[in-house]
Image (cartoon, helix red, strand yellow):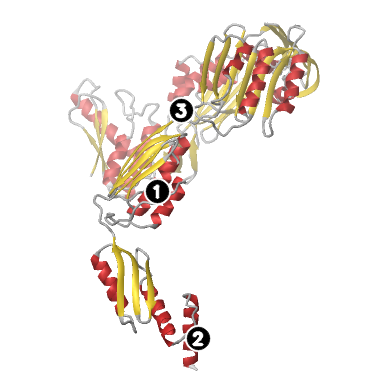
Amino acid sequence: MRDFFAIVAILFAVITLGVFQVPDKNALVSAGIRAEAEAALYQQRHPISVEVEGRVITASGRVESDDEARAVVAKLGSLEGVDAVVSKLDVLPRVAPFLLKIDKDSDDISLNGHVPVQALNATLSKHLETDVDLPTATGAPDLAWVPVAERGAEALGLLLKGEMRLEDRVFQLTGTAHLPAHLEQVETILADLPDDYSVSLSIDVLDDGLPYSLFMNRDPYMGLRVSAKLPPSFDVSLLDAIGVPQDQTIALAPLPLNQPEFGLVAELAIGIMKDLPQGTVGVGPRVLSVQSGPVPEQIAQSIEALRADLPPGWTMQLALVPEDSGDPLALRAEWSGETLVLTGRVPSDFDEIALAQDLNVTLASALIERSPYPDLDGWSDSHGPGLRALVLLQQGSYEAEGEAKKLTGIAADPQARRLVRQMAQGVELGQLDLKDDGSPAVFSLRYDAATGAVLDGKLPADLSRQAISEAIGLQALRGNTRIAPDGNGSKVISLLKALQPWLAEVDAFLLAFDQGSVQAQILATPGSNPEQLRTSIGRHGARVTLEVLQSPPPTSGTIRNHVVLDLPQVATDGYWLPSLGLQPERGVCLDALQGVPAVPFVPGRTTFMLGSARPIARLAAVARSCVNVGGLTLTITAEAASAEFDVLNRQLSRRRAEALRDALIERGVAEQGLVARGSETADQDRILYAWQ
């Protein structure tokens, strides 16, 4: 059975190899030898054919050296059943340097040199679209030479003309490309040639790559202007029909572009421009655009009819302004306090709906006549200030004709009237009356260090939220206010300006204004001196009923963010201390002392001065971390030089240091971690700190 399958296999090989004579023993042997020989040679770089007669093999083809020829003969001779090998192998000539040179012009392609493998001729023929039959030779520097030659031929095929030269590992390509896109394709093809190849490219581009275009503009003042890039065969004399241009830039493309319908559309555009007294006609990629005005209706209709003559895929963009009666534009707006009514003659693109949305009002009606012209000079926008001022009134009207604009109406209060006057820039202001409910000017200003200020009520005529905000130094005032038609609030401003420098030492205050009378209650933060605060405010001339009290101690652990200092604070032992989050390390503690402001004392005394509460609170916050937690000792050294005698200065120094130490102990700093010393000599009043 095994012999049967062997015989079938041999018969199949014989038929496949084209041995059609009547099979005998010798024919079957020859067919088997031929099959084995071809299998042994299939990896040869150059094809080798074999013929078998009996047990003798004849090998024909090309090899690159005598050694390769001997190796082929030896390989065939070693096959089982082979008696002899006849060599008809041709040894390819060796060429140095190994060169392939291709020249391309508009009419012909010429090639010189050699190919290392015959298959390269077929690839070159494909890329160059011509028959190539270069001789085969050896000497190519490496296996990459063939792919480099193939890519070079492919790149050359994209050029209008040029030369490719590949000599050993030196590649050069020069020539001319039609468009920048072709140059990009060439660069992409040759982008990653082997690193050990020297590559030189020198390629010019014939065309700038821009599409065909035609732009024609006629202006009463500037005259006729024409610029164009046209097909090579376009009849430029057709442009004579539109007149003599004052400025003309016309270029013919060196070669046709892929825009076959452009010439037809350009001729249509020239016909349109011929009939326009002014305007612009342009042709771009698949677009014909026309802008002009005023245009008689007959001409506008003839231009519109040309849409049907455009090639498929082309569009026409028209912006034609029809002729107009010449009546001036005008606008009148009536505002009832709830709805707006518009009348007048406006541009064709005036958008009353968008206007009402922008003003955030309800449009009751718009009885307007539209001009055929669009708004080309900002006419609609010029009414913005007047209309925005109008809707701030309780009721009123706005009238505009030509350059004249006028606003009249009733304002809710003096503040609203001032705002209307500020907003209505470029508008004549007619009668602006005030509307008031007759109630007196009564308001309150409440302040809390944690939550800020609230202003509620009716302000006298000379006050405003902005004036109060600036006087107290707080930007955000909550609450609702109105403005009375009269009244004087100058006392309020004086009081707030006197209080503003010390607001950091105030926990809360209440200011009440009632028809000119001003009362104020102020709560000084724990650690601040209420009497000193009262004296300071009185010294600045604030003639009001004033009560200054000490704020009750806060509950320990309470947290707030001081709105004036913009600083988180925590209540500790009855005082507000800044929440610093210090790491109790010596270096951090040294740096923290640098941020402690000077603690002010009353000259010649041990009493703390107004303004000392904040620096003492910061020093206490630092000391609580570094002494209580970090285990450091803070030495407080006071220097005094303001007394007449040295002995008094020494006493004053010691007592000030002790006073500051006691203040820190009251604020929760461990007593054993504080040392108070008075300086023996000094040339100024100051406090020094040191860690131990």
Image location of residue 111, percent across then percent down: 36, 45
Amino acid under disc 2: Val
Task: Note whether residue 293 is visible.
Answer: yes
Of label 1 and label 2, which has the lower sequence position? 2
Amino acid under disc 1: Arg
Of label 2 and label 3, which has the lower sequence position? 2
Left or right of 275 on screen, residue 643? left
Amino acid under disc 3: Pro
**Within-10-Å neighbours for mark 2: few <14, some 14–19, many 20+:** few
- Is residue 331 or residue 524 the one in the foreground? 331
Q: CA distance from mark 1 to mark 2?
A: 48 Å
Q: From the viewer's perspective, is residue 103 above or below residue 382?
A: below
Q: Please give the name of the residue rendered at 69% of the width and 20% of the height, measured from the top-left corner.
A: 319
Image location of residue 251, percent across then percent down: 51, 21
Find residue 351 and name its label. Answer: none
- Is residue 494 or residue 13 the one in the foreground? 13
Using the rendered view, name the quadrant where residue 419 is placed: top right
Q: Give the foreground label among 3 and 1.
A: 1
Of label 3 and label 1, which has the lower sequence position? 1
Q: Give the foreground label among 1 and 2.
A: 2
Circle 2 — which element? helix
Image location of residue 194, percent across then percent down: 32, 51
Q: Which residue is mark 1?
A: 151
Q: Which residue is mark 2?
A: 8
Left or right of 555 on screen, residue 434? right
Q: Which residue is mark 3?
A: 530
Circle 3 — which element? helix
